[in-house]
Image (cartoon, helix red, strand yellow):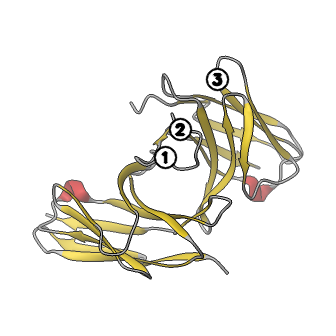
Amino acid sequence: EDQVTQSPEALRLQEGESSSLNCSYTVSGLRGLFWYRQDPGKGPEFLFTLYSAGEEKEKERLKATLTKKESFLHITAPKPEDSATYLCAVQAGTGNQFYFGTGTSLTVIP
Amino acid sequence: DSGVTQTPKHLITATGQRVTLRCSPRSGDLSVYWYQQSLDQGLQFLIQYYNGEERAKGNILERFSAQQFPDLHSELNLSSLELGDSALYFCASSASPGHMANYGYTFGSGTRLTVV
């Protein structure tokens, strides 16, 4: 069964404490993997798209990487404003099926 | 402001009732997508329209239907509502007809539906 699993469910970091969020997937025919950020009461905000193993994308303190089975979102020296839920989604299959993970809730403490 | 407008922001209704959620896509975007987000299931894709025609269908219940009008705004109709339909309903838009454009797509702020 195609699925996307994110871990951990919740993460609390001190400001400046770097860490990584994981998104593992079991799908056939990956077409793309997407990272979104969601703030409370708002819609998800697009961050990155990754297409093939080995690909990396960076934006400010965030860096996304992709392997054949998982993706990591690395957060370097986070700030309180990085606190949000980070969602991973994959697009797969010939029918463009796609799946969202349930997200990682990140809290960065000043 | 993402450019995708959803109304209403909040909706409280009783079981068995019917509601309509509205979405205006970002200017220039032809694709509209509807998602349901509940606490225990995360984001679930419901349906996509591109330039007025249904393009892709996800886990949308038969009690739910949607359409996209010539001016490109879209409506999601939910009928015979049940307690379990309580959720956030998001609309997203993109310029591309392909599901999930290369640059991702833009979400609205959602409609919070509470069924009592």
Q: Nearer the viewer, mark 3 or mark 1?
A: 1
Q: Residue at x 32, y 67 (%)?
A: A106
Who comes first in sequence, dot 3 or dot 1?
Answer: 3
User: Which subunit holds the residue at mark 2?
Assistant: B
Q: Nearer the viewer, mark 3 or mark 2?
A: 2
Tell me the SS state at disc 1: loop
**Residue placed under numbered mark 3 in the picture:** B72
Do tag 2 and tag 1 residues touch (Cβ < 8 Å)? yes
Residue B76 lies left or right of residue B62; in this view the side is left
* Depicted B94 relative to depicted A98: above or below: above
Q: CA distance from mark 3 to mark 1?
A: 18 Å
- Give percent across and percent down for residue B32: 61, 36
Tell me the SS state at disc 2: loop
- Kindly identify the amino acid type of the residue bearing the numbered disc 2: Ser
Q: Residue at x 67, y 81 (%)?
A: A1
Residue at the limit of the structure toward the top, as seen here: B71
Q: State which quarter of the image contains the N terminus of chain B.
A: top left
- Give percent across and percent down for residue A65: 29, 71
Looking at the rendered structure, which numbered label has been put on residue A49? none
* Depicted B66 relative to depicted A97: above or below: above
**Residue placed under numbered mark 1 in the picture:** B101
- Kindly identify the amino acid type of the residue bearing the numbered disc 1: Ala
Who comes first in sequence, dot 2 or dot 1?
Answer: 2
User: In which quarter of the view is residue B8 placed?
Assistant: top right
User: In which quarter of the view is residue B66 placed?
Assistant: top right
- Give percent across and percent down for residue A84: 34, 58
Looking at the rendered structure, which numbered label has been put on residue B96? 2
